[in-house]
């Protein structure tokens, strides 16, 4: 599962413009760190400090990506937890679609 999650984020990150920040996703036990400060988004499984950390389950992540779960409702209901810079979190649509 770890590789599949990391691979999906890597594909989405390469297709998106650099986000100009760092984001860490904690999906169940899997960590996905995205460094978008350079010319491209770089994805790794490093557990680094990030401008924004987003925690959720794999089930909720898949529901977000498919459009079955509204991002705002997911945060409001506690299915997705965000720590750090909310402005960075708002840039995530390009990485989740």
Image (tube, rainbow, N blue to C red):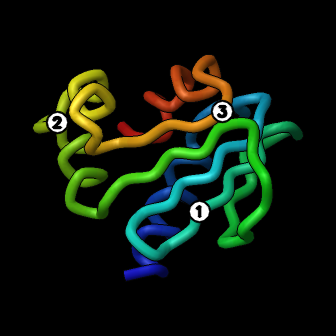
Q: For the residue labelled by badge 1, is the local secondary structure a helix, a strand or a loop?
A: strand
Q: Residue 48 appears in which quarter of the rendering?
A: bottom right
Q: For the residue labelled by badge 3, is the local secondary structure a helix, a strand or a loop?
A: strand
Residue linked to disc 1: 32
Is 58 situated above or below 4? above
Residue 40: x %, y % from top left: 78, 43
Q: Real-space Cα distance between discs 3 and 1?
A: 16 Å
Image-based side of 1 in relation to 70, left or right: right
In depth, the one of 16 and 23 nearer the eye is: 23
Q: Are marks 3 and 1 in contact (CB under 8 Å)?
A: no
Q: Real-space Cα distance between discs 2 and 3?
A: 22 Å
Residue linked to disc 3: 84
N-terminal label among 1 and 2:
1
Residue 87: x %, y % from top left: 62, 17
* Neighbour tally class for label 1: few under 14, some 14-19, many 20 plus, Cα within 10 Å: many
Q: Can you tell which mark lies on residue 97?
A: none
The residue that appears at 28% across and 39% down in the rendered structure is 78
The residue that appears at 72% across and 68% down in the rendered structure is 47
Looking at the rendered image, the quarter that the N terminus falls into is: bottom left
Residue linked to disc 2: 69
* Neighbour tally class for label 3: few under 14, some 14-19, many 20 plus, Cα within 10 Å: few
Q: Residue 68 appears in which quarter of the rendering?
A: top left
């Amino acid at each position: 599962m770890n590789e599949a999650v990391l691979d999906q984020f890597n594909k989405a990150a390469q297709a998106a413009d650099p986000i100009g920040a760092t984001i860490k996703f904690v999906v169940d036990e899997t960590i996905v760190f995205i460094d978008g400060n350079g010319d491209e988004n770089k994805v790794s499984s490093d557990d680094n400090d990030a401008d924004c950390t987003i925690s959720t389950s794999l089930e909720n992540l898949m529901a977000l990506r498919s459009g079955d779960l509204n991002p705002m409702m997911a945060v409001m209901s506690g299915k997705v937890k965000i720590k750090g810079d909310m402005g960075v979190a708002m840039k995530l649509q390009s990485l989740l679609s």
